[in-house]
Amino acid sequence: ALANHTGLAYQDVSFCIAVMNLVFGATQPAFGVLAARTSNRLVLLIGTGLVAASLAGMALSHSFAALFLSLGVGFGTGAGALAFGLILSSAMRRVGPERAMLVSGMLNAAAGLGAFALSPTLQSLLDAGGLAHAVLSLLVPTIALVPIAFVVTSADPKAPRTGKEGMDKAVGQHSSSGLFRRAFRNRTFLLLVAGFSTCGFHMVIIESHLFSQYVSYGIGTSDASWAFSLYGIATIFGALLSGWLSTKVPQGRLLVFYYGFRAVWVLAFLFLFPKNLFGALTFSIGLGMTGDATVSPTAG
C-alpha cells in the first residue's frame, strides 16, 4: 500500500522500514536517559507527538525523501520514545515489583490485541479510502495515548529528576556513561543483548513482510490480513502464558525454548508447510505464541 501510494518501488519502502527499526532501537537508550533526567511521562508524550506527526507525514508522502523522514526517522524516533521499558517501569510503580512479570505479559498481550484488531481494520480502511485515509485514521488512537500516558505514569515520582543528584538516584548512583560502561562489561547483559537483537532482527523481518509473503503465495489480501490477525491473537495467549511462566520457570530456559521453537517453526514453514491459507493460519498461530513471549523473561 505504501509503495502504491508513494509510487516507490517495494525495496525503497522496505529500506525505510529497515531504517525505522534501526532508529527505534538506537533512540531508546537516549530516551531512557532523558526519562531518568526528567520523567517517563514527558518522554511518552514526546513519543506520542512524534508518532502523530509521522503518520500525517506518511499520508502526504509522495517521494522517497518524504517517506524516509516520516516513516524511517519520525516514526522510528517516536516509537523509541514509546518503548516498552518506560511503560513497564511506570506500571511496576503501580503494582509492585513482585507482579512485574505478570504485568509484562499483560502489556505484551495488549500489543497482540492491537495487532488482532488493526490488521483487518486497516485492510478495510485501505480498501475504502486508500493509504492516506487509513494512516490518518490511526491519528485517533494515537491521540488517545495522551490521557493513557498520564494514567500509566500517575504513580511516578512527582518531583522532576533533574540535575546530577536526580540522575544519580535514577541510575543507581552512577552517571549515564558509567552505567553503559558497567552494562557492557556484564556478561549476562551482553548475552541478553545478543539474544534479543537476534530476536528483534528476524521478528521485524517477519512482521514487516509476512503479509506480503502470504499474498505472494496466492492468498487473497482479505484472507492474508485475517491470517496476520490470527498471529496477533496467538501473541496475546503467548505473552500471558510467558508472563506467568516467568514467575515459575527459570527465565533462561524459557528463552532457549522460545528461540529454538521459533527457528524450527520458520524452517518448517519454508520447506514443509503447504503454501495456502491453512499453512498460513498454522504458521501464524505457532509464530504468535512465541512472538512477544520473549519480552517477559528478557525483562526479568
Image (cartoon, grey):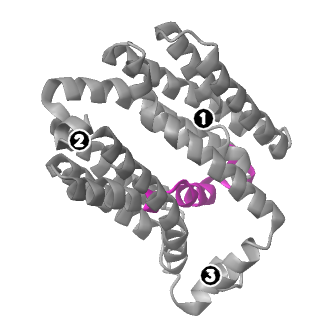
- The reply to whether callout 3 and callout 2 are in contact (CB within 8 Å) is no
Q: Which mark sits nearer the N-terminus, 1 or 2? A: 2
**Residue 71 image position (x, y, % from top left):** 31, 53
Residue 142 % position (x, y): 31, 48
Residue type indicated by callout 2: Val
Kindly identify the residue that appears in the image at 52 percent across and 80 percent down. 37
Per the rendering, the mark at residue 176 is 3
Q: Where in the figure is residue 78, as x and y percent of width and height?
A: 38, 59
**Prevailing SS of the magenta stretch:** helix
The three-letter code of the residue at mark 3 reads Ser
Q: CA distance from mark 1 to mark 3?
A: 31 Å
159 and 214: which is toward the camera: 214
> Which region shows up in magenta?
79-101
Q: Which residue is mark 2?
A: 135
Residue 150 lies, with reference to residue 274, above or below; the image says below
Describe the element under mark 1 as helix, strand or loop: helix
- Relative side of 104 to 158, left or right: right
Which sits earlier in the primary sequence, circle 3 or circle 2? 2
